[in-house]
Image (cartoon, grey):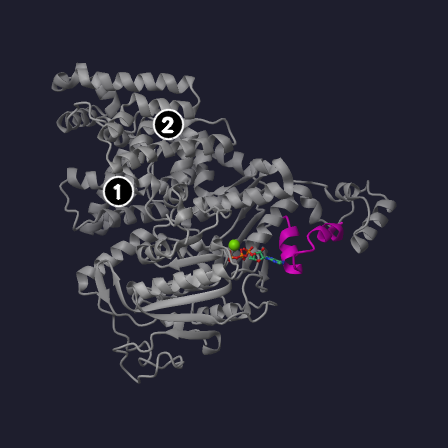
């Protein structure tokens, strides 16, 4: 029977088949880039649903006759015979779709997983829990979060909202935001949550340690959690943190999911942090049919708390687990693959593996050393035009950079050359003020306790409710431990609010009217009413400037997302469901493979994707590897893994570019080519570009004339930090990269809106 099933999966190689057809027990699939890990994961789910345990057992059930066996033998040998009979004989214990939990890191990957499964398995695939960590958790929380004391209509705060709250706290507590930068405070809070520490516990620990600074941060954490609690809001970390708490504290909830999920599968396991590990292993705790897939060489989220340990210690945690390794790469040509292997080999902390490919040599990698960032951008644009004229599609090209800030020049070059492009993760649609305003109205209608959103809209459009009134109402709310909405709804009861009572009543009447409409109308029609009745459209129309017209378009554009949600909502569509969806929507989700345009994104966002032609730009010391990694072994290894991820996205042609001089964050700097480039053996690399680099120091070997790997500037031991024009600007640079690197599934519609607003014409 196994043979007959294997026949169906015969396009996989034997190791891949083994991984796809083993159904029971823990399984670790550890393999390098492009070896088919995600492919195996998808086939594994297909196998579970078609044949289930049947594919894994060698016993022949009693009801199978001699004739059946002869049939199967014949079928395996020749592929001839009745397909339905074969399926009947093989499918002994197929898994129901809702018993399968498959988790990947981005919504896009989850969407792709669903699409591919739907193609293989038909509509039944809709019931598989294929999602990101965050959406799976939101689903679990909506059902049971009341047990933790939260309302099930909780709101999700994105990183910007969280920052706003921290900033408010710093202001209210009179803490200097230079000494305690909000972003860094949030980082501490996030790590405390990853270590499963509630605010009180964290505060007690910090106080005991006597560390003044940490104690202060712990106090901010406590106040932050209090404010989120009052607003019935969860931030991204809370979504996972509270799910884990829920599962740990409530046996019946845990047992429910442990019974439910017979099979748990996780892609990109190398990037899980502690909380995600706890979550996954708890959910898989019932059957322990726990399959994790990953590559220790592609772990690139250490800064967010991801720990390679999760993958490296899997074998220890699950004694007797099966470990399957894949070594054949199906993605890239030899030059690309061997160059990537050579680079990653410089890392010490790795399990070590080598990939090979049957593919041809292909083209050598090309390194272009540009004069400056304009020259670099122009070079990239020229290669893309050349590729297009030779018959490639625009979408065959991807441009990868270390930080979002680098996209600017390239974007301009694309525009100048009429190349259609899309930036993934640039300015986010949902970061636009007008879109945030509309979402805030929806959020308050869904959850009136959402004070943060309420303050955003209460006088927007202007209704004569002044900042002073709002502050007074906030004070009352704090004093009475009630929500802001409850206070303004009863404004007449408070003498301090007497003068504004009529206006406040006008606002709550409007919200009441809208809530009534929400019950009656479908979401899209409701939204159109919302734009009108709030006076928002009128406000923008009356000003009639170009900006305001664009704003109005954006406000209307939100309708597109609502339609998208209504079309695809698996469950009964609701306002809460829509808000969840947009809150968890990431920049990558908008990557629509059918749309023909060049894509630009950070290397982090490119994880798991592949493109025929890839440009890795800004391959310079101080940029990539970033300045903070220089001299720091662990950070450097992480940067090198990122380089490996970036290089292995390419199927046929890989370009690397660096610039002799670069203007970034308003400063000009001269950087040397990245050490990663120097780690590529010369036989795989063709060097082009302006010939010499000044200030190379050491033995000046010709740059364009194939310098040997260790030549040029006397190795990296003596490497001097490139000047960024003083400490402050280096700081600014780091600040920028931090933001850009925050990879959690943040609602980010940059690509989306660009796509909508005619990226086709070069934006
Ligand atoms: P990454 O580490 O980058 O996530 P991966 O290991 O998940 O990569 P996949 O994306 O699954 O790799 O596969 C890489 C490419 O190889 C895909 O284009 C896939 O279709 C192809 N591929 C995988 N297995 C096979 C196979 N057995 N035969 C032919 N092509 C394959
Ligand atoms: Mg993959």
Let me know if residue 363 appears in the view: yes
Q: Quadrant of residue 466?
A: top left
Task: Label 2: state its secondary structure.
Answer: loop
Residue 20 lies in the magenta stretch: yes
Q: Which residue is mark 2?
A: 151
Q: Chief secondary structure of the magenta span? A: helix
Q: Is residue 415 left or right of residue 103?
A: left
| Disc 1 versus disc 2: nearer the observer | 1
**Front-lying residue, 123 or 524:** 524
> 83 and 260: which one is in front?
83
Location of residue 275 with respect to 325 vertically, above or below: above
Q: Position of residue 87 (x, y in %)?
A: 75, 43
Q: Percent position (x, y) of residue 371?
A: 30, 70
Residue drawn at (34%, 39%) of the image:
430
Q: Which residues are magenta?
A: 1-24
375 in relation to 41, above or below: below
Residue located farthest toward the bottom when viewing the structure as drawn: 699
Q: Secondary structure at mark 1?
A: helix
Residue 740 is covered by the magenta coloring: no
Quadrant in which ligand 1 is drawn = bottom right
Residue that numbered label 1 is attached to? 163
In this view of the protein, which residue sits in the foreground, 651 or 545?
545
Q: Is residue 19 left or right of residue 661?
A: right
Q: Which residue is drawn at the image coordinates 48% and 33% (left, top)?
A: 253
Mark 2 Cα shell of 10 Å, populated few (<14), some (14-19), many (≥20) = some
- Nearer-N-terminus badge (1/2): 2
- Could you tell whether 751 is left or right of 323 in the image? left
Where residue 524 sits, quadrant-wise, is top left
Residue 620 shows up from this direction: no
């Amino acid at each position: 029977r196994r043979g007959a099933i294997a026949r169906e999966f015969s396009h996989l190689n034997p190791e891949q088949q083994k991984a796809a057809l083993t159904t029971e027990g823990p399984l670790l699939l550890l393999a390098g880039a492009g070896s088919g890990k995600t492919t195996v994961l998808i086939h594994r789910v297909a196998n579970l649903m078609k044949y289930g345990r049947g594919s894994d057992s060698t016993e022949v059930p009693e009801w199978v006759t001699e004739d059946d066996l002869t049939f199967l033998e014949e079928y395996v040998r020749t592929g001839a015979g009745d397909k339905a009979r074969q399926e009947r004989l093989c499918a002994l214990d197929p898994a129901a779709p809702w018993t399968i939990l498959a988790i990947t890191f981005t919504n896009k990957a989850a969407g792709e997983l669903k699409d591919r499964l739907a193609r293989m398995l038909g509509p039944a695939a809709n019931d598989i829990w294929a999602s990101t960590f965050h959406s799976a958790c939101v689903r679990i929380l909506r059902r049971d979060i009341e047990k933790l004391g939260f309302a099930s209509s909780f709101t999700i705060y994105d990183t910007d909202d969280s920052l706003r709250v921290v900033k408010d706290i710093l202001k209210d507590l009179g803490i200097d935001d230079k000494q305690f930068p909000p972003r860094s405070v949030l980082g501490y809070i996030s790590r405390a949550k990853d270590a499963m520490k509630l605010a009180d516990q964290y505060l007690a620990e910090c106080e005991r340690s006597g560390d003044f600074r940490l104690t202060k941060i712990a106090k901010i954490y406590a106040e932050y959690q209090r404010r989120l609690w009052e607003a019935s809001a969860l931030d991204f970390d809370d979504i996972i943190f509270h799910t884990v708490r829920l599962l740990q504290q409530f046996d019946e909830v845990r047992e429910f999911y442990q019974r439910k999920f017979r099979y748990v599968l996780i892609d990109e396991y190398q990037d899980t942090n502690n909380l995600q590990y706890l979550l996954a292993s708890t959910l898989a705790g019932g059957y322990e049919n726990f399959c994790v897939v990953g590559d220790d060489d592609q772990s690139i989220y250490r800064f967010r708390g991801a720990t390679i340990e999760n993958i490296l210690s899997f074998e220890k945690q699950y004694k007797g687990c099966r470990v399957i390794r894949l070594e054949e790469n199906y993605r890239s040509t030899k030059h690309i693959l061997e160059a990537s292997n050579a680079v990653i080999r410089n890392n010490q902390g790795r399990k070590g593996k080598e990939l090979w490919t049957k593919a041809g040599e292909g083209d050598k990698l090309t390194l272009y050393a540009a004069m400056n960032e304009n020259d670099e951008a122009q070079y990239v644009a020229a290669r893309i035009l050349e590729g297009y004229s030779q018959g490639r599609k625009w979408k065959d090209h991807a441009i990868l950079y270390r930080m979002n800030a680098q996209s600017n020049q390239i974007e301009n070059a694309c525009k100048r050359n009429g190349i259609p492009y899309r930036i993934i993760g640039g300015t986010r649609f949902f970061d636009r003020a007008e879109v945030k305003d509309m979402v805030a109205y929806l959020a308050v209608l869904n959850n009136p306790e959402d004070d943060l959103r309420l303050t955003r809209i209460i006088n927007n459009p202007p209704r004569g409710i002044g900042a002073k009134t709002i502050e007074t109402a906030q004070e009352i709310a704090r004093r009475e431990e009630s929500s802001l909405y409850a206070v303004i709804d009863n404004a007449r009861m408070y003498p301090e609010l007497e003068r504004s009572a009529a206006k406040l009543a006008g606002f709550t009447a409007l919200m009441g009217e809208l809530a009534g409409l929400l019950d009656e109308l479908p979401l899209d029609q409701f939204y159109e009413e919302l734009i009108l009745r709030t006076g928002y459209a009128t406000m923008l129309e009356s000003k009639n400037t170009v900006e305001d017209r664009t704003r109005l378009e954006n406000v209307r554009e939100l309708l597109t997302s609502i339609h998208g949600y209504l079309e695809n909502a698996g469950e009964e569509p609701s306002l809460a469901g829509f808000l969840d969806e947009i809150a968890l929507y990431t920049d990558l989700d908008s990557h629509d493979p059918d749309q023909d345009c060049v894509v630009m994104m950070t290397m982090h966002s490119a994880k798991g994707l592949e493109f025929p032609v890839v440009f890795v730009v800004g391959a310079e010391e101080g940029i990539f590897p970033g300045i903070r990694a220089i001299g720091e072994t662990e950070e450097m290894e992480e940067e090198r893994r990122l380089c490996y991820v970036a290089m292995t996205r390419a199927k046929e042609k890989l370009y690397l570019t660096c610039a002799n001089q670069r203007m970034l964050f308003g400063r000009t700097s001269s950087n040397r080519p990245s050490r990663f480039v120097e780690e590529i053996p010369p036989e795989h690399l063709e060097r082009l570009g302006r010939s010499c680099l000044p200030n190379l120091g050491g033995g000046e070997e010709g740059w364009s004339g194939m310098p040997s790997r260790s030549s040029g500037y006397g190795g990296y031991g003596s490497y001097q930090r490139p000047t960024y024009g003083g400490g402050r600007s280096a700081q600014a640079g780091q600040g920028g990269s931090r933001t850009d690197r925050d990879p959690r599934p943040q609602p980010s519609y940059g690509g989306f809106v660009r796509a909508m607003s005619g990226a086709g014409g070069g934006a």
